[in-house]
Amino acid sequence: MGALWLVQTFNERSIFDVEALLKEYLLEEDAEKNVKHPRRIGVYWPSQVWDCLRKVYYEYTLKEPATEETIRFGALGNVLHEYVARILKSVSEKYGGYTVQNEVEVKIEHPNLDGVTISGRVDDLILIEWSKEKDAPKHSKILIEVKTLAKLSSKENHNLPRFEHICQLNTYLSLYPDAQGILLYISRSNLDTRVFTLEFDKQLYEKTLKRVEEVHRYLSSGVLPPAEAKISKNERWRCMHCQYAEVCKSS
Ligand code: SF4
């Protein structure tokens, strides 16, 4: 780190600027992640496939760095994901019965498109595997996807579980078709939780593969997709948080 957080004062003594330290750390951590998992046309993250088509296009072509707000939200999401994994691990250490894996790698080769994969960093997935056959529940594997939201009760979140989250977890479940999927929503304001369970849905997975084809078609041909979120009344809220809103407006 560049130690910007040690500020020289007029009397030559340094002060410890914890705010600058946190900011510098988060920005560097995000930059490292981007180096490790650069955006490349043909490699798509499960979390972005069902986002606004035009926004995904901008993310790959304009490659603007994430805003500080997005980086902070991401960091908060990671903190809560680790918190859930830690609780699950601590119960498992105390009572046994299952193992917990919280760094699950995902790489799916697209069956119809050569060289196209659905992969990338998976920061919000936890895999539970029952080690004792006799105590195992109906599913011996459970995939938990942790999603954080500002408030579970806010207007934006009246329609949980969100379609794109179901599709994302369903994509992971394609690698573990016998596992149970759990979507765990956690409120960033008071740790309120809501849980939804799902099973692998082959038809939905095929729909997601088609969507990847659509994303890839726009990106590989260099054609700007329609402003998908803007033209759908139910999706317009996305534009409020979109860092490409200005460029989208002028396109
Ligand atoms: S402003 Fe809205 S329509 Fe335009 S790219 Fe962003 S989310 Fe999509």
Image (cartoon, helix red, strand yellow):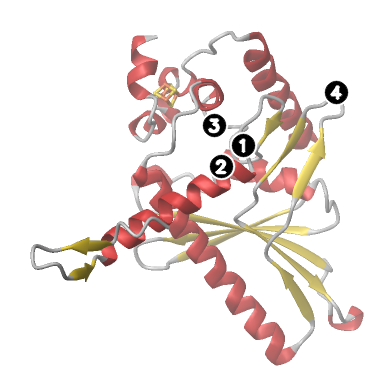
Mark 3 C-beta to ligand 1 under 8 Å: yes
Marks 2 and 3 sit apart, C-alpha to C-alpha, by 19 Å
Instruction: Residue 148 in the image: state x and y as whole percent.
Output: 47, 56
Q: Check disc 1: other Cα within 10 Å, few if <14, some if 14-19, many if 20+.
A: some
The answer to whether the residues at label 4 and label 1 have Cβ atoms under 8 Å apart is no
The residue at the point 65 percent across, 29 percent down is 40
Q: Check disc 4: other Cα within 10 Å, few if <14, some if 14-19, many if 20+.
A: few
First of labels 3, 1 by sequence position = 1
Marks 1 and 2 sit apart, C-alpha to C-alpha, by 5 Å
- The residue to which callout 4 is attached is 114
Name the outermost residue toward the bottom.
94
Q: Secondary structure at mark 4?
A: loop
2 or 4: mark nearer the eye:
2
Q: Secondary structure at mark 3?
A: loop
- The residue to which callout 2 is attached is 34
On-image quarter of the C terminus? top left
The residue at the point 72 percent across, 72 percent down is 100
Marks 4 and 1 sit apart, C-alpha to C-alpha, by 19 Å
Instruction: Residue 94 in the image: state x and y as whole percent.
Output: 68, 91
Q: Secondary structure at mark 1?
A: loop
Which one is in front, 37 or 105?
Answer: 37
- The residue to which callout 1 is attached is 38
4 or 1: mark nearer the eye:
1
The answer to whether the residues at label 1 and label 2 have Cβ atoms under 8 Å apart is yes
Q: Answer with left or right where residue 66 lies relative to residue 170.
A: left
Label number found at residue 51: 3
Marks 2 and 4 sit apart, C-alpha to C-alpha, by 24 Å
Instruction: Residue 165 in the image: state x and y as whole percent.
Output: 59, 45
Name the outermost residue toward the left.
10
Marks 3 and 4 sit apart, C-alpha to C-alpha, by 23 Å
Q: Amino acid at mark 1?
A: Pro
